[in-house]
Structure formats: structure tokens, C-alpha cells
Image (cartoon, helix red, strand yellow):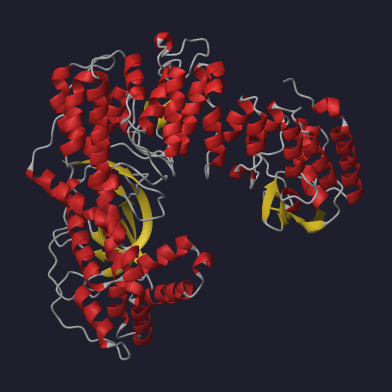
Amino acid sequence: MACTPEVPDVPPREAPWTPPPGLDAERAAVISEAIVGTSLDPWALELREVEVWDNDVWHVEGSPRRTAGWVRRDPSGGAPFVLVHGLWWLAYAVGPRVDLAAACEALLEMQAIPVADRDWDLERALNERCAPALAVVALSETHPELAVRVARQWLEGGAAYSASAALHFERAITAHMRGDHCLALADARVVAAEWREIQRTLTGEQLGYWEYLEEIEPLLADLERRARQSRPVMPEVPAEGPVPAELVPALIAALEDVAQRQYGQPGGVSLSRHPIVDALIRVGEPAIPALLDTLEHDDRLTRSVHFWRDFVPARTVLAVHEAAYTALANILESSGFEVVATGDDLTSRGPSGRARVAAAMRRLWELTRGLPPERRRARILADDGAGSLAWAEAAEWIVSRERSARLESSLALPWIPRSVSPDAPMRGEPLRADIDPTITEQMVRRASDALADDRERHACELVGAALQWDFDAATRALRPFGRACIRAEWCGCAPTIVAALDDRALLREYARWPGLADLDGAYELWPILAHPNAPETRQLAARLFAERGALARRPRAPDRLVTRTTLAIPELRAFLRRALDDDAEVGQVDRWEDGLGITFDGGWFAVDDPTPLEGPQPIRRRDIYALDLSTLTGVGFSMAWPIERRDAAIARMLEALADETRWRLEQ
């Protein structure tokens, strides 16, 4: 296992430290504790320009970085080590000395600027030069007043820990990711000690900021386990096709070396692409018992890390049970788990979340074991205890036309799409012979059950599957569900159901659907487009696009609302014509670096428009609507044009909107 060389033994500083005048005893004690008895002695180190081999969660193997740090020469003649912002690194190049006092003055000036206005790269560079504890001690004799100011700034709000715990945590994570076990273990031990001290001394919001350090406890335990045990060997597996079942124990043991990288932010970690997880998936059903046992009982960690954003310090080292779950979900073609945010994952759900998923997966296997694939889905739909997620996944499997995706992991954005042939039969075709109840009736029934359990998304997925499976039968069965959906606090498939059903009573109820209160897309208008001649439709359209309605008070229409399709609605075109006649000044246009910038009450946007513009100009409501309608009407328009030219273009748009035949749709 890879190991970074340890820092050479350096005699600890034993001499007492004399604080500068004006530094209170509490702050002086913190600084004394940071250096006395350690190798952090500014008189034994030199602050110099250096080059180190740095890394982060994107570039785990590292890359060279120029910075400044406190250099310690190796007495034995080896490569020098350098202390950069609280961390020791091997120095690959050493340059000239750095003016410490000037760096600290510049840092204090930077920290006096509001956070939003700071140059973050410069602040990081200054922090590395003005390492707080060392800087305070080194400046005490030559610049005592500056030393006091640095100490006070450093120790505000628990900042004494920032140069140690946070940086050691990140380096422990990245070292573990690339398999540098010695460095990861050394840093994890430092962080664990710092985390205990933080918990002892901080409370409230100050403690809350550091709660991400809780992750160090399972990581340290796993690193210490690895130090005691030999590393498992990945068995040789075929490059393609089935993998022999006798390899499962070795593959399970090797899951601790699954080292996949996150592919974006937000994003997931493609666990199923790792050769070990992929091999387990290719074993198939014979691997399920061992995978279930791993999901339930294995407490090891992988070397894969998930995070919400790289600039937020929290990191989650994904557990081995999450890799096992990924293989299991792909074999069963059922997830059993849903993320609720882009930073969510199964590992973060803790023991209780893990136990729920494991119980659901084991129940699913026991319920469907030995059945053909389509019969498994029918069994799930018929099972009252399967739950809304399992019902929805079973319904979507039945109407899918081939295996169209692989579950990458439990994380956000987990699917790899594959091409699907629209001419291929649905995978559930053999189930069409079921008549008591039919598959359609089962799907609609489970949609109602899911809605009653406040699982609106699952309910709507079941409705969509029912309409794909048998449109006519589904529309006959969906009326009671449609009324319940409209009355629910939020049931997003109400437009689909009302559009599909020829039911005037349902149209009247749809006018009260909560989703219409904040009209922002074409989807909500489907019922109007589907039933253009119903009186209820015309009344609803008149209300939505009324002259003094909610939409009329916006300076700009939602960009997803006005489309080639929705322009078939006469009331919407009438609303747009009124907007194109509105001369009210609502904002201004100016030349920005990337084009024209439009600012108005409630928002701003930029357009790629090279038209010359001399200084900021006022814009009217009609100008914003004209810009949005330019492509749909085929009439060119620029905010930078003189007002006469803009008005001429708007006149042509008004003529286009008045031409009813141009916007008529085939039913």
C-alpha cells in the first residue's frame, strides 16, 4: 500500500514563548499550546517560496502548485519538508524568502473586506504565507503590534482550528482516495483529536460549522482496520459476459478498493462502472445472498468519495454496503432507495436508513425469487406491502421496451441511458393475458394508494405507465384518481389526466388545481389544448390570461410557457398582444462583456447580441416580450435598436399573432 514519507524527527521546541505586549493571556495560551512541545518553531524554519505536489477531490493523483511555506531542511540531506497552511508536504522546489510582515498586513487588509468582495485566490495565498501561530511568534519581537492583530483575527469564531482540522481532513480524504494509507491515517488521527477538542470547546453555530468532521471517525476506524489487515486481492474476471459465482467471496472482499471519482457537481459516483462492482453485477442472481449480507452487515468503507460541492468542506466516504447495494439494485432492477438532494447518498442515511433499504431489498428478493422477470413485477404490483417506490418501478419496467439504463449508484443523477427502440415490444407483454385484475387496474389502484400515502411522484409515475400500457382502459379507470389528484396539495400529473379524459366535471375541478396558481410552463395548459371547444376550457383560459390576472403583473412571461404549441390558445395570444402594446418602462439594457444585459424589476438576463449600443437605455415591457417572441414569430428584434425600429418589428409580431390560421394545431 502506498505511503508518503514521514516528516523527519525534529526536536520539539521546549523554550517558553514570550507574548507581545497587548496580547491577552487566553490567546497567548492557545498560541503557546500550538507551538511549544511541537516542531513548529519559526526560528528553526524559513518562510520561502516553494513548489509542492498538491491534490484535491478532482485531481487525486496530484499536480504541482507554487505557494509559500515554512521550510524545514532534512538534516540527513533528503528532500526538504515545508509547512503550508498547517500541513507538512515534501518540497519539490524551494525559492527565495518571503516578507512575513508584508504578507500578514496584506492578509488583515483582505479580511477587512466583505466576504462577497474578496479575491479568494489571493486570500488563500496570503493565508499560506501568514500561517497564524508561527506568524504571531515570529513577529512578536520585530512587529509586536502586528503580531497582536494577527492573533486576534485568527482566534475569532474558532478560527484556531481552521489551519489544522479542515486541511488535514481534506488531505486525509484525498490520500485515502488514491490509496496513500500512511498519510491518510496520520492526517485522520490529527483530525480526530482536533474534532474532540472542537466538540469540547465550541457550541451553537460555531460547533455546527465543524460538524462535517464527524466523517473522520468512521474513516479513522477503517484506516486502522486496513493497517491491521492484509489488502484483499481482486480476482481475475472475464472482460465481458458472465462471471463465475465462485468468485463472489473474493469480489465482496475487494469492495473496499472500489475507487470511483465523482463526475461533476452536482453529480454522482459511478460505482457500477468499477470493475469489482461490474463483475458482481455480471455474476447475477447467484451473488444476491452475499450482496444482501454485505448490505446488512459490512461496515467497511470504499475509497470512493461523494460531495455536494467542492468548495464546501463536507465529504462522504462511501461505504462498502453502498457498492453492494449498487450491484444488488442492478441485478434486481429495482432501486429500493431515492435521494432527496444532490448531496444525498445511502451512506449518509446512517444505520437506520441502511436497515430500511436492506429490509426492502431482502423482502423484494424473497417475494419474487424464482419467477420470470415480468411475473416478478406483477407480483410486486399485487403486494400490498411492497410500497410506492417498488410499485412505480415495477410499472415502469412493464412498459419499458428493453433494459434501457443501469443504476450507477444511490446518488444523484444515477442513470446511464441507453438507446431504446420504439418498435420493440414492451417487456411486460406476456402480462396482457391477466384479466382479474388487469395490469391497468393494478397500476391505477397502486397510484391511488401512493397518492393516499402522500407519494405524489410515485402516483404519477404509475399513472403514466398505465396510460402507456392501455390508454383506453386507463382513461376509464382514472376518473376517481383524477379528482383526488386535483384536490391534493401537489399532484403534478393532474394536467396529464385532465387532458386524457373527456370529462367536463373534471375540467371544472381542474380550474381550482393549486398548480395553476403559479403558472410557469406549457404543461399546465395541456387540458386547454386537448379540449379546445369545451366551455370550461375557454373560461379557464380567459381567467389565466385575464387583463388584470397574475400573469399580467409580471414584466416577463415564463420562458417555458410561450411555445409554438401553446400559441394555439387564443386567450394567450390576446394576452401577448396586450403585452406588445404596453409602453410601461420596466428596466434598462446595457452592453455587458458577454452581450446585452437586460435588468428589470424582479430579474435580469443576458443575450448574445453584438448590435452596437451607446450606454444604458430604458426598455419597455413590450420590448421584453418582443425579444422573447422573436424566434416564434420569425421577426428579428434587438434591444439595442432605435425605438422606431423596435416598434416596427413589434407591429409585424402583432400581425403574426392575429393570424389565427398560423397557430392552429391538429388535434
Q: Residue placed at 87% from the left, 38% from the top?
A: 654
Q: Is residue 135 left or right of residue 460?
A: left
- Looking at this rendering, what residue extends furthest in the bottom direction? 21
Q: Residue placed at 25% from the left, 87% from the top?
A: 25
Relative to the observer, which residue lies in front, 541 or 322?
A: 541
Q: Residue placed at 71% from the left, 51% from the top?
A: 550
Q: Does 476 appear above or below 434?
A: below
Q: Position of residue 62 (x, y in %)?
A: 33, 46
Q: Residue placed at 82% from the left, 37% from the top?
A: 636
The answer to whether residue 91 of the structure is visible from this angle is no
The N terminus lies in quadrant: top left
Relative to the observer, which residue lies in front, 45 or 317?
A: 317
Q: Does 258 appear above or below 165?
A: above
Quadrant of residue 303 within the rendered picture: top left
Q: Does 68 appear above or below 625?
A: below
Q: Position of residue 58 (x, y in %)?
A: 37, 44
Q: Is residue 327 left or right of residue 597?
A: left
The answer to whether residue 171 of the structure is visible from this angle is yes
Mark count: 0
Relative to the observer, which residue lies in front, 308 or 336?
A: 336
Q: Position of residue 379 (x, y in %)?
A: 32, 20
Q: Is residue 592 left or right of residue 209?
A: right
The C terminus lies in quadrant: top right
Relative to the observer, which residue lies in front, 501 or 608?
A: 501
Q: Position of residue 19 (x, y in %)?
A: 26, 86
